[in-house]
Image (cartoon, grey):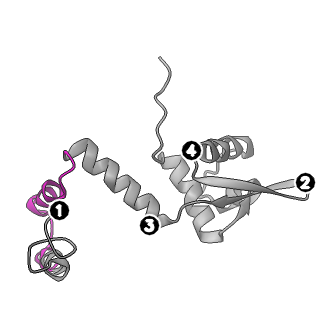
Amino acid sequence: MPRQRTESLTDGELRIMRVLWSSGRATVGDVVAGLPAPRPAYNTVLTMLRILERKGHVRHEKDGRAFVFLPLMDHGQARQRALTQLLSRFFDGSAELLVLDLVGRGDRSPDEVRRIRELITATSGPNGPGRGGRR
């Protein structure tokens, strides 16, 4: 059975996107050089860049004989998409369940729990959490 296509980033695609985010634009050779060892083959990176282009995450321009790839979303947008998918798949869309799971695991330091509480308080309006009110 063929693998199901996903719009989210795989681990390998994320490594490539990190190179593009740090450089802003890169040829396939630049991406290969920017990846940690052991580096994948040039053709593997090219294939993955084309997949990322089909998914709408990157685009390319021709620069002489080379293709230069540019990210179409920044790291923050990628994190937001991943978090939205995580909430949808594992927490029934509930940020509350996610936070309860994170804080309730018991492996958080008291200082980290305090900072989380401060963030929640700082982003809460008079009507509850979120941008001035309940969602």
Give the mark nearer the N terminus: 4 vs 1.
Answer: 4
Residue 65 - label? 2
Q: Do the residues labelled 2 and 1 touch (CB within 8 Å)?
A: no
Tell me what residue is drawn at x 52 percent, y 65 percent: 74
Give the mark nearer the N terminus: 3 vs 1.
Answer: 3
Residue 55 - label? 4
> Marks 3/1: CA distance?
22 Å
Give the mark nearer the N terminus: 4 vs 3.
Answer: 4
> Marks 4/1: CA distance?
30 Å
Secondary structure beneath dot 3 equals helix
User: Does the segment drawn in magenta span residue 98?
Assistant: yes
- Looking at the image, is 123 positioned above or below residue 38? below
> Marks 2/1: CA distance?
51 Å
In the rendered image, which residue does mark 3 sit on? 76
Mark 2 or 4, which is nearer the eye? 4
Three-letter amino acid code at the position of disc 3: Gly
In which quadrant of the rendered view does residue 33 lie?
bottom right
Q: Residues within 10 Å of mark 1 (few under 14, many from 20)?
A: few
In the rendered image, which residue does mark 1 sit on? 135
Q: Is the magenta stretch mostly helix, strand or loop?
A: helix
Three-letter amino acid code at the position of disc 2: Arg
Q: Are marks 2 and 3 in contact (CB under 8 Å)?
A: no
In the image, the segment drawn in magenta is: 92-114
Three-letter amino acid code at the position of disc 1: Arg
Mark 2 or 1, which is nearer the eye? 1
Mark 4 or 1, which is nearer the eye? 1
**Quadrant of the drawing holding the C terminus:** bottom left
Three-letter amino acid code at the position of disc 4: Lys
User: Does the segment drawn in magenta span residue 69?
Assistant: no
